[in-house]
Amino acid sequence: MTRLGYSLRFSGRRRPARERNCVVPTGKSRCGIPSQSDDEWVDRNGPRGTRLSHNFAVAPRGGDYSRAMTASQPPAIAEFTLKAVVVGIVLGIVFGAANVYLALKVGMTVSASIPAAVMAVAVFKLLRSRNTILEANLAQTIGSASTSLATGTVFTIPVLFMWGIAPPLWQIAILAFLGGVLGLAAMIPLRRLLIVREDATLPYPEGRACAEVLRATAGNASGSRWIFHGMLVGAAVKLLISLAFLMPGEAATLVFPSLLPQAELAIELSPSLLAVGFILGFRQSGVCVAGALISALVLTPLIAFFGSRLAVPVAPETTVLITDMDATAIWKTYVRYIGAGAVATAGILTVLRNLPSMVGAVRAVFVGVRGARGAEAVQDERTDRDLPGTFVIGAIAFVVLTAGFVPGIFAGDMPLEARLICAAGVAVFGILFVTVAARIVGIVGVSSQPTSGIALITLIGVASVFTAMGWNDASARAAVLTVGTIVAVAASKAGDISQDLKTGFLVGATPARQQFGQLIGAAFACWAVAGTVLLLGNNYVIGVDFKAPQATLMKTIIEGVLSGTLPWDLVLTGGGLSLGAILCGASGLAFSIGVYLGVASMAPLFIGGCVRALCDRARRGANDTDANPGVLAASGLVAGEGLAGILVASLVALGRVPKSAATVFEGQSGQWAVVATVLAICGFLYVAAKKG
């Protein structure tokens, strides 16, 4: 491993640094202690005279900065400032709302760390405010806190709307906040072990990429304009569809109807889905569309073919014949359960496959706590300072006791005995899966974190206890669901803060300030997330206008376990499909999401992945990082469509615009308008990537 050393410069004369693996400032100071007025840094292993201005204490490009960034930096470097906090809060609200919209549409969220980092630097420059890389890092840490809250909330809470139990704003916000606090507090004892000591074995890919982006944009924020361009494009397309009603939101056609009954290919006009496919890349998006094609061109035609010869309904349907169903009805009645089984199997197998890491991660809790008292824990060193142990214990106790003893936190208005069982489920599953998530994301990244599998195991465990106690009514279902909300948010939060702490480790940030920043971000973002869920849930039909695939899956599992009516034959069929994809080396979860969502949602994902492949081929040999303007433009598309969708929902709620209306372009012209718009968005992403 390359070791970086830095030295002081005194009137042109070099002197060894007191710590070989540290960054020290220039300036005349006694005993190597920097003065607070120092404002430049000298790289001893870089080109002679290399200076890192504005206190951007980062390693040279291509260097190994994983160890060099851990030393203390002088107190003169600004980090936890008002402007960094305010910018982070605003970015958290923006990306939290956008991720709620995206997750309701397609069951996925995108990490906000990198776009938040780029936008923070751009905002600082726009305000003509001098800033440090640590301020930008703190702003992205606070801003990215909303992603985990959106993930856990949208995977569960929409089920309450499907059951006709619209929760109040405060309940959604508090559930999200409690999950965020639990995930943050339970992760703190693990920081030294996972982020510092296991630096060589746990890369934390998003955290490293964000550190690289911070360094790149700190010196030149020109690429950041593509985020704002993407936001404008994404918002414009959404407003043309849902506000101006210029064209339909989807194009569809039957495929060989005489040979493949009810086989349908479709594409949804969604800038955010094209952007997600671009971010995922060709292979991952290809796996997703493969599952969707199995659903549209294999499962649906097979069910239609054999069902057309039956004169009686086939379970779980009790009245309508299959021959009288169209492709949508067949999906809702049969293929949906196959997809649910595929997703559930993929999520559970992902957790089981990481079982050794889970066991090691649980041990790491105790190792991390002991390590905090050991000789390696130098609490006087700024870059190794966590929030105190009293906060960890107090925060976990606060979450569990508040959830158990305060009526109304868990949905369903259950008695104290049931609430205590729910609180115990939060404590056991929450702490367990926080340790699991914190380690898993260090290897596979946040995007591959099995949040749905974690939520499913939690729901099955708590629902089984409720069944044994004889609680299986609507209130029991709602209570079980909200246990899953807190645990899913906590696990997602642990993965999120782990990546942020890795970024901070690489750029010399203060862990305690990042942890407190995440707490601030969660305190504000929980209301934005809750408000967005409530706005969309009250004005649209969840499961129809928004498919909410993960939430629908949770609903299916809870109802099936508590009532004993789950169609296990269809569910296990989906499990077999998922297992086959995994044995072929594909991502079981990506394939299963495709089976579950269908081809309309996965087609734009795949097209976005194809554009990314073309861009990567054209840029072969270039430094292709997550700072690529194409990726930044794609992040902007996600944010822009999400914010425009929230604006439209607000106008619908106020009665200013209708939810739907006849489009200007209809029929064949409408189909071509959709195709032309998709191609235009692809061209925008290609141009953005080429500019990088």
Image (cartoon, helix red, strand yellow):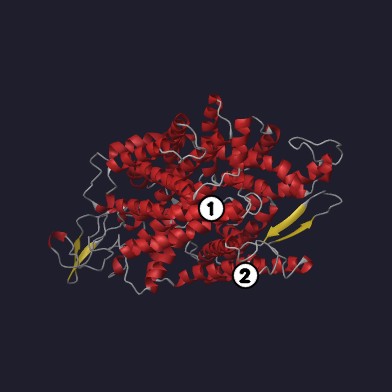
Residue 581 located left or right of residue 118? right
Coordinates of residue 144 in the picture (x, y in percent): 43, 56
Can residue 587 be seen at all in this image of the molecule?
no
Residue extending furthest toward the left: 30
Relative depth, front residue between 404 and 203: 404
Residue 260 located left or right of residue 473? right
Relative depth, front residue between 494 and 17: 494
Residue extending furthest toward the front: 655
Can residue 179 be seen at all in this image of the molecule?
yes
Coordinates of residue 12 in the picture (x, y in percent): 19, 71
Q: Amino acid at mark 1?
A: Leu
Image mark count = 2
Q: Earlier in the sequence, mark 2 or mark 1?
A: 1
Q: Where 15 sits versus 402, above or below?
A: below
Q: Disc 2 vs disc 1: which is toward the camera?
A: 1
* Residue under the image location 54 percent in, 49 percent down: 154
Quadrant position of residue 375: top left
- Disc 1 is placed on an element classified as helix
Q: Disc 1 marks which residue?
A: 534
Coordinates of residue 612 in the picture (x, y in percent): 59, 62
* Residue under the image location 62 percent in, 70 percent down: 683
Mark 2 closeness class: few <14, some 14–19, many ≥20 residues within 10 Å: few
Relative depth, front residue between 395 and 507: 395
Residue 261 located left or right of residue 601? right
Q: Where 33 sits versus 421, above or below?
A: below
Q: Is mark 2 in CB contact (under 8 Å) with mark 1? A: no
Residue 683's label in the rendered image is 2
Coordinates of residue 162 in the picture (x, y in percent): 61, 45
* Residue under the image location 28 percent in, 53 percent down: 383
Q: Residues under labels 2 and 1: Cα distance?
A: 35 Å
